Amino acid sequence: MVCSSLRHSVAWLVAVVLLLTAAWSSSVAQSGRKRETAPRQYEPAKPKSPPPSETQEPPATPSRPRTVGQPDAPQSDAPRNDDSEPDDTDENTLRIQTQLVTVPFAVVDKRNRYINDLTAQDVQVLENGKPQEIFSFTREHDLPLTFALVFDISGSQQYSIAEQRLAAKAFLRQALRPEKDLAGVVTFRRDIEVRQKLTSNLAALERAVDDVRFESGGYVYGGTPPLDPSITGTSLYDAVYVISSEMLPREAGRRVIILLTDGEDTTSRYKLNDAIDMALRSDVQVYAVGIPGGVPNGFGGVTITGIDRRTLERLCEATGGRAFFPRSPADYVAAFQQIETDLRQQYILTYVPSDATRDGSFRSITIKILRSGEAKDWRIFTRKGYYAK
């Protein structure tokens, strides 16, 4: 009897041992997949409660953008509605509403050499013919630049675009400073197309320039009529207007349009004066490389169509830029080098207008050099005015 009971006990113990051994073996087998770390649970962090010794302050409200020439308003202990106007009767509130006019300009002698030794005592600035007191006067050569390279791809430019591309890429490699400058690429005929938005990426800009091609659409003598007549024409004034109003005005530093065109305009909705007006409102300078147009003459050759010098000179001089007229494709690079030198060799003059009203009217600006002698033959490049707004 005792033996039988003992046998049952031993059998029960053996069974338990076998079960434990099987469970251990199964666990070892399953652990054969390596897992370097346990699965991570992605849960939002719980907000931390401040220590008992700290008081929780309400979140700060965003401050208004600070206006140059206007000090920050004094802080008050009472909550304030940001949308309300400051109380003029509060003697602790100082309100300064001064408009500072900035005038970049360059001076060259009759041999086209830059004059780089002027001081504030050598210069007089007039607004609407009245002398103004100069607030600051500096010679700058390292200001940030934002410029748009604008290619005319209408029918008259089809034989020169290849040379234009080479010169433009050389200019970008020389002039663009990725840490400071921005550039974009735009083409136009009747329509206007941004090929590359403003960027400091030189490779992207070069690719955009490489993609600039003459696009058939305009009717030329000896050719076939375009499939879509709505795309024919040249809208130079529209291009300057749109780029000045939409692409450049919100950028810092010097804002410049560089045109490669023969100056002809056939389909713009805006007039030349409209383009100049918008460039002035947006503080944009326009430079131009005048490139003669050409069309097939029907006898296997090309008829040169010339350049509208008067239009390009008027557009550039009114906005403080210059127009260049290379005599051959080999001179395109030299023209771009001259533009870069222009942009780096400028004086910056500021003044507070004696007429402080902001009525939106146009105020003319004139810079005079007070030196005697050969200074009477020097040329001054600056914008013709601004809008008091």
Image (cartoon, rainbow, N blue to C red):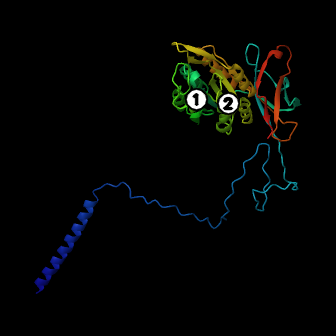
Q: Nearest the camera: 177 or 320?
A: 320
Q: Which residue is mark 2?
A: 237
Which quarter of the image is occupied by the N terminus?
A: bottom left
Which quarter of the image is occupied by the C terminus?
A: top right
In the displayed structure image, the side of residue 77 where residue 18 appears, left or right: left
Q: Earlier in the sequence, mark 1 or mark 2?
A: 1
Q: Element at badge 2?
A: helix
Q: Residue 349 appears at what percent x and percent y?
A: 79, 30
Q: Residue 193 appears at what percent x and percent y?
A: 58, 34
- Crowding at mark 2 (Cα within 10 Å: few <14, some 14-19, many 20+): many
Q: Element at badge 1?
A: loop
Q: Which residue is mark 1?
A: 232
Q: Residue 189 appears at what percent x and percent y?
A: 59, 29
In the displayed structure image, the side of residue 204 where residue 148 appears, left or right: right
Compared to residue 32, the image places residue 338 above or below, namely: above
Q: Nearest the camera: 270 or 147?
A: 270
Q: Amino acid at mark 1?
A: Thr
